[in-house]
Image: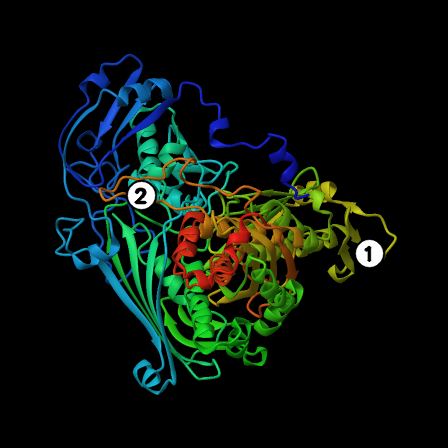
Amino acid sequence: MRAEDDRLLTGHGLYIDDLVLPGALEAAFLRSPFACARIKSIDVSAAEDMPGVAAVVTSATLGFDRSLPVMRDHAGLKNPASPQILAGTMVRYSGEPVAMVLAENRYLAEDALEVIVVDYEELPAVIDASSAEAGAAGTVHEWMTDNLAGSFTQRTGNLDVAFAAAPRLVTFSCSIERGSAQALEARGIAAVPEADGVRVWASTQRPRGIRILLADYLSLPLDAVHLHVPDIGGSFGSKAYLYAEDLLITMAAVRYQRPVRWTEDRAENFLATYPEHVQVFEVEVGAEPDGRLIALRVRLLHDLGAYSPYGFAVCQNTADHVVGPYGIPNVEFSCRAVYTNKIPSAPYRGAGRPQGVFVIERAMDALARALGMDPAEVRRRNLIAPDAMPHDTGLDTPAGRLVYDSGDYRQCLDIALRESDYDGWRARQRELRAGGKLVGVGLANYIECSITRPHEAARVALRPDGTFRVGVGVSAQGQGHETVFAQLAADALGVPTTAVMVAGAAEEIVDTVGTYASRSTIMAGNAVVGAATALRGSLEATAASIAGIDPRYVFAVADGIVPGDVGTDVLRWRDLYSAAVELGLALEAEHVFRSGAWHVSNGAHVAVVEIEPVTGQVRFLRYVVAHDAGRVLNQQIVEGQVLGGIAQGVAGTLLEELAYDESGQLLTGNFMDYLLPTSAEVPEVAIYHLETPSPHNPLGVKGAGEGGILPTYAAVLSAVEDAIGTPLSRVPMTAARIASAIRRMAPTQVPALENAGSQ
């Protein structure tokens, strides 16, 4: 069991809603019912007169004309004043906040929303990304002449020459629709005014960045904003941004000098928490007759929604992963990002990486069909050989040249094929199809590039009771930070893990960036080891000084430090603390770990499914993962990350979709329509580990937080496609869509369907 599990599973976690804040006002937000409308007037007088209502805030009374930040700006991005903190003259998506009510409790605040009168002039909405690009439906932002937010191209080699010489050409389209994080705990924030500033509790995965932004927007010194991160009930990227509600709650606490709190309800979560993007691809592949890829051209149409809180971050990740673990000499990836009248989108677990994997693995399956080859063999012939590491892709990215550090991609594929009994399933598949069963085998290889730059820090301190405290700036949302960082610190200090307490998202950790992009163990883990090692050396030197002996003859043991030969008395940690305090010596150490190198994990998934031909329901018969995240520090933690990612990937492939009508209204805004996976839909997974340490950090670790989801879309759709025998091009591929695809097939393509219903 992980160190944090007992506390969390027995109800002793501390979340935003658990905070006791006497006299706190509670907030509720009025949100636009329209995807595109002009606000002609807002009348809040009736709400202000209601008993228990302390204030009603609109754009006009906010007294603040700055827009929210772009977390990762990009050159060439046409960035409107976006997103608005509160909509004043225009609303650009359904769910955009228009007014905030502060009342003595949430019930009164919600009641007050009902009497606010907004005179909207509804306008035509731009919903479809293709129409948005063409400009036929008008513009989302009136100051723009079109809806193109920006574009970029990433290439290596000579595409025109390569395609002209390629003996085999394959073209296809594919797309991935919007999905939502749907964390167990929705967003929440609480703020309490103080004499020198404000104290904030936020459910966020980027505490340092949010603290800096709050100080900036409130014109306060950084040390006047005290930010705490309690337990977080999931995030998956959705809590990595400064939302309007975060800023409004904090500003209200300062303005009205009262504690203020807000927790998002589930309906708001669908409307107001930024989801994943829509991505539509046009793909061209040039290959030799033996299946070796010569050239790859990918054109991406990227739907940002109404604003661009993360700029091109997601589509850049797609570009960085579209080559995958394959050696392709000529590559061109171009992206055109457009605005539409839908909720702004932002990173969701994988953050564009699953889309890149999806494209290249769709290409591998399409090429295998065109050449009449086994899909596994096409992949094997293109995988980068282990003796070619480090591998320079030739692609220049905003983070520098994309170079893979280490890995044995062929061995990962071979493990997955062997352990899944790939050849056996291929043989049984023919027999089962003859009996009317639609069984398919799908596979996908992948890489996972972690964003490590620029740095991460940790602090380790000896406490008066003889235990150790580890402070890190990366917040946990289920990754097992308390377990892993305690394990690393304990190993470096030479003490049991029970002697180490981990305090996440510590305010005093200055050089912190945050938790995202599978970077925490690489960056914070190495920082923890560096700090613990430095502290151990300092404490050993202190003990040597106290004993008056050469530091070379002092060494740490579990209970303390032995000053001298083995068998002498141990200077207990608590006694060493007291002695060091008297001498004024250091009892803590901080270490900053820096890296600008790519840390590239990899793996292979094999999925075997059976399709019920009438309903289109998918049942998993086998699911195998071969996974290489460098050195495995804690197998349970790594496998938990892989399994969680697969569950989300299966849901994104077969179930979850944020669907909109032509006016921009969300059609799947509850759990009756937006289908989350249960244990019945998630497969039993067999995981096999391969370890090729990264040369770019002392621990040799790579990222593992997102690898599980990256290939799942591709592997599952590959299996479904293989089962029904017809190409598929989009996810989610729901049961209804699968059944429809089966019905559209010629009768001779579907074997013995008259017997299938009773099987």
Color scheme of the displayed model: rainbow
Q: Nearer the viewer, residue 605 or 109?
A: 605
Q: Would you say residue 359 is visible in this rendering?
A: yes
2 vs 1, front mark = 2
Task: Indicate which disc residue 684 carries.
Answer: none
Q: Relative to 387, is 323 on the left or the right?
A: left
Amino acid type indicated by mark 2:
Asp
x, y (%) of residue 530? 60, 58
x, y (%) of residue 302? 30, 58
Q: Give the residue number, with chain letter if any, for mark 2.
A: 216
- Quarter holding residue 688: bottom right
44, above or below 680, in the image: above
Q: Relative to 706, is 77 on the left or the right?
A: left
Residue depicted at x 24% and y 36%: 86
- Mark 1: few/some/many CA within 10 Å (<14, 14-19, 20+): many
Q: Nearer the viewer, residue 747 or 411?
A: 747
Dot placed on the residue nearer the N-terminal end, 2 or 1 = 2
400, above or below 40, in the image: below
Measured in 3D between alpha carbons, the distance from the residue under mark 2 to the one under mark 1, in whole angstroms, is: 53 Å
Q: Relative to 42, is 164 on the left or the right?
A: right
Per the image, label 2 sits on a secondary structure element best described as helix
Q: Do the numbered discs 2 and 1 sit on residues whose CB atoms are within 8 Å?
A: no
Residue depicted at x 63% and y 31%: 10
Task: Indicate which disc residue 564 carries.
Answer: 1
Amino acid type indicated by mark 1:
Gly
Quadrant housing the N terminus: top right
x, y (%) of residue 312? 32, 58
Identify the residue at the far front of this view. 754
